[in-house]
Structures are given as structure tokens and as C-alpha cells.
Image: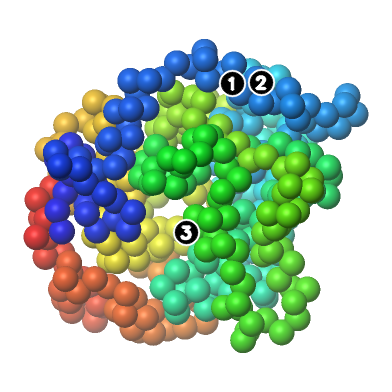
Amino acid sequence: MKYCNNCLEPSTYPISKFNSKGLCSTCQYYSKFVNNFDEDQRFQILKEITKKYNNDKNAFDCIIGVSGGKDSTRQALWIRDKLKLRPLLVCCTYPPEQLTDLGANNLSNLIKLGFDLIVSAPAPQTWKKLLKKGFYGGNYLRGPELALYSSLPQIAIKYKIKLIFWGEGGNAKTTDISTIVKQKEYDGNLLRKQDTLKNCDLSWTKDIIEDEVKLIPYKYPSEKDFLKNNIQIIYIGWFMKDWSVLNNAKYSSLNGLKLRSDGVENTGDLYGSMALDEDWVIVNQMIKYYKFGFGRATDYLNYEIRQGKIKREDAIKLVENYDGKCDTKYIRSFCKYINITETEFWNVISKFVNKKLFTLNNKKNTKKYLPKFKVGIGL
């Protein structure tokens, strides 16, 4: 394990590549991104794209995927008020046991801001089965992410809306650039090829879901369907130089967004702004930390380092203090939902912990893994 010489991205990141100067692919991309960014030019590119897909006066111009969080609130306002389009917002929501009051209130805020909204809610029983199986396979988000990303093109086809906006895809400004090198960086139609959707494979669900009708919300439309209906996905973040976690949180907060109140020592969330519609993302970030040696704090601070807002040595201290933080209450809530004990939870987690990076420490009858590596240095 080694670290980027500029930021704190580790070589354990699944899609990270370092050049001869010891810079990660993200820092290489960011340098290119900043030095070649002409916001006026990019805005004109976007205007030309949208002209191709403008509907008549009695229809929506585009669909925007939203959760009510910082990114979706900002992009909805930007697309409506600056781009002058008539968007239909679409939210694939969580089951009642998972959706937070904060998330519901933030979604309501979008309606108060004057937007039309469609909410898609997959059957809770199917959702839970897929989530639980995903957890035992090391990624409980596998099923939910299929539903999330499938909902937009499904509804776009149904409503005959050709243009879809996501905020940022392929982690273009934070990690992976290899998936977008050969295409226009704002083009989201290759989302199906990325690791998130794994080519939309549902074969792993067959032993737990007998009725295929229950899987309809998880079926991403085929490439043939995209071509037939002239569907185009655009990543709006590519057109906005100041698109970032912190900027989006600030902007959206000024427009009614409420942030998470729990402290960073319990969540690992430096800004209290991540995935406000559900709390188990905190569990997921802890699992990611044990798999790869970095969590949400690293993700946030790397961006701040690249923008020159924090020094690398100062960021190291924050990463050491907060990466992988997850209060027991979130673990207990997750365990209750999928009906397992905390002991079983840690037994499953132990299978996916990178033993080269962490060592087991029993403390107060709770398994805890301690890092062998030094942040900023590695092993």
C-alpha cells in the first residue's frame, strides 16, 4: 500500500493508477480538468445538446435523478433556473425502515421549491432480500443501486422524455477516468458498463426472487431500448467548475436543505452532508474502510487538497481521526433490518476485511480492526 504524492488516495483504491511521479489518476485528471476548464464554452456545449432534446410546450424537457440531498437540490435548481429547462424530478426511494425523516423532509423541500416529482418505491420485501444477499456478498448496495439507476431510464421511456441528468458519474472528478477517456466525459450512456451496474446482471438474484415481476424495478433498459427511444444521459457536474461536496452542500443549505446533525465522530462525515436520506451509508463507508483502507473522510479531503483548501499534512490528521467511523447505533439498526445479530454482522465483515491492512483487536466484546498502515505513508 502506498499513497499519492499529492493527495491521500491509496494504491488500494480499486481503480487507482499512479504515474511515474507518484500521482494518482485522479490528481492527473484534476490538473487537466482545472487547466482546461472554460465554463462558458462548456455551457454552450450543454445548450447545444439540450436543443436536440427539447420537447413541445406540453411536456417535460428532461428528467433529473434526485434524493433531496445536496447534489440533487443544486442540480435541479441549476437546470431549471440557469439552463431554463422544465425538469421532471424522479426519486427511487428507500423502504420506510430505511428512509430517514431528514431525507423525507429534504425531498419535500424540492417540492416546495416548485418542482414536479415522481417517487418510485420498489417492494420492501424484495428490496430487503436483495440487500441482505448483497451484504453477505460484501456489498449490500448491489440491489439498491440497480433500482436507483434503473428508475430514471425506465420512467424516461414511459413518459417519452429523452434527456436524463445525473450529477456526476464514474467518479469522474474524484477517481476513475479510465472509463471515460474514449468518450465525451459528460456522456452517461456507458453507465451500464461501469462497476456499479456490472452490465445490469441479475443472475445473482434467481435463488431468492422467484417472481420475476418483482425484479422489474431493478432491470436497467437495454442498449436497444436506449437507441429506440433516443435516451441520452448527461453528467451535469462536468459543466460546473465549482461542483463539489462542500459547494453543493452550502448552496443547497441556502435553499432549504437540512444537514445531518450527528457528529463526525459517529459518522465519519466531515460536513454532515452525505446520503441524508438513509443512515446505513455510514455502515457501508466503514465496510469500505476495512476493505481498502480509506473511507469518506479521505474522499472529501482529497478533493479539498486538490483545490488547495487544506494541506496534505493537515488532512492526514483528520483522516486518522475520522475515516471508518461508525457509531454502534447504525450497525444495530442495520442488523435489526436484515434480522441478524451483531455477532453475525462482524462474522460477515471479517471475511472482507483486508488482513494485510488491518489487525483484529477485541475490545469490550466488540470486534474492532486496527490499521497496520500509516496514513499518507502506507505499509
Quadrant in the picture for residue 318: top left
Q: Which residue is mark 2?
A: 48
Percent from the top left, x then y, of residue 297? 29, 47
- Which residue is found at the position 41% from the left and 73% from the top? 138
Lower sequence index among marks 3 and 1? 1
Up the image or down, 153 lies above or below 240; here it is below
| Residue 97 visible in the snapshot | yes
Lower sequence index among marks 2 and 3? 2
Closer to us: 117 or 182: 182
Up the image or down, 148 lies above or below 307; here it is below
Query: On the rendered structure, is 277 left or right of 354?
Result: right
Say few, some or many: other residues with alpha carbon within 10 Å of mark 2 (under 14 / 14 to 19 / 20 or more). few
Going by the numbered disc 3, the residue's amino acid type is: Asp
Up the image or down, 368 lies above or below 310; here it is below
- Which residue is found at the position 71% from the left and 71% from the top? 215
| Residue 258 visible in the snapshot | no
Label 3 close to label 1 by CB (< 8 Å): no
Kind of element beneath mark 1: helix
Closer to us: 130 or 37: 37
Kind of element beneath mark 2: helix
Query: On the rendered structure, is 370 left or right of 122?
Result: left
Going by the numbered disc 2, the residue's amino acid type is: Glu
Say few, some or many: other residues with alpha carbon within 10 Å of mark 1 (under 14 / 14 to 19 / 20 or more). few
Query: On the rendered structure, is 175 left or right of 142?
Result: left
Q: CA distance from mark 2 to mark 3?
A: 30 Å
Q: Which residue is mark 1?
A: 45
Going by the numbered disc 1, the residue's amino acid type is: Ile
Which of the image's four quarters has the N terminus? Answer: bottom left
Percent from the top left, x then y, of residue 282? 40, 58
Q: Residue furthest front?
A: 182
Q: CA distance from mark 2 to mark 1?
A: 5 Å
Q: Which residue is mark 3?
A: 195
